[in-house]
Amino acid sequence: MYIDWMALGSVFGVSLAATIGLVGLFTLGVVGLAKRPPAASGGSGGAAVARAGAYVCFALCGAAVAYGIHLIVV
């Protein structure tokens, strides 16, 4: 029985990087949704940008999951 350790290490590295990247992206989305404008100030421009960025992060996470499912099915 022969184990290709280089291929196994490559798969492990890519899996680890993808996992850390997706978790980080999802975390940025959660942090973006948690942003609330201060009650004293009337402007909510920063919160709107943070919310839009959060939606982009969630869309990228969804796209990555959909691509992974596509790779498994096809």
Image (cartoon, grey):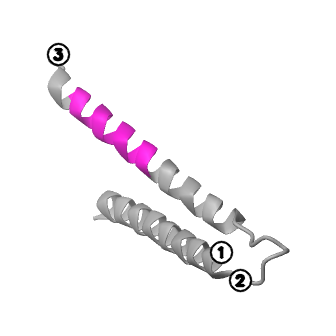
- Residue 4 seen in the figure: no
Residue type beneath disc 3: Met
Residue to which mark 2 is pinned: 43
**Above/below status of 73 relative to 17:** below
- Give the residue drawn at x 37%, y 47%: 18
Q: Depth check: 35 or 72 in front?
A: 35
Using a 10 Å C-alpha cutoff, classify the residue at mark 1 as few (fewer than 14 neighbours), some (14 to 19) or many (20 or more).
some
Q: Secondary structure at mark 3?
A: loop
The residues tagged by marks 2 and 1 sit, at their Cα atoms, a distance apart of 9 Å
Which of pointers 2 and 3 lies earlier in the amino acid sequence?
3
**Above/below status of 16 relative to 53:** above
Residue to which mark 3 is pinned: 1
Residue to which mark 1 is pinned: 47
Asked whether, in this view, residue 52 is left or right of residue 20, the answer is right
Question: How far across and down, in percent of the image, does residue 49 sit?
Answer: 56, 77
Residue type beneath disc 1: Ala
**Where does the magenta region start and end?**
8-21
Question: How far across and down, in percent of the image, does residue 14 sit?
Answer: 29, 41
Q: Secondary structure at mark 2?
A: loop
Question: How far across and down, in percent of the image, does residue 23 sit?
Answer: 51, 49
- Residue 54 seen in the figure: yes
Residues at circles 2 and 1 in contact by the CB criterion of under 8 Å: no
**Above/below status of 17 relative to 48:** above
Which of pointers 3 and 1 lies earlier in the amino acid sequence?
3
Using a 10 Å C-alpha cutoff, classify the residue at mark 2 as few (fewer than 14 neighbours), some (14 to 19) or many (20 or more).
few
- Give the residue drawn at x 47%, y 63%: 61
Quarter of the picture containing the N terminus is top left
On the image, which quarter does residue 43 sit in?
A: bottom right
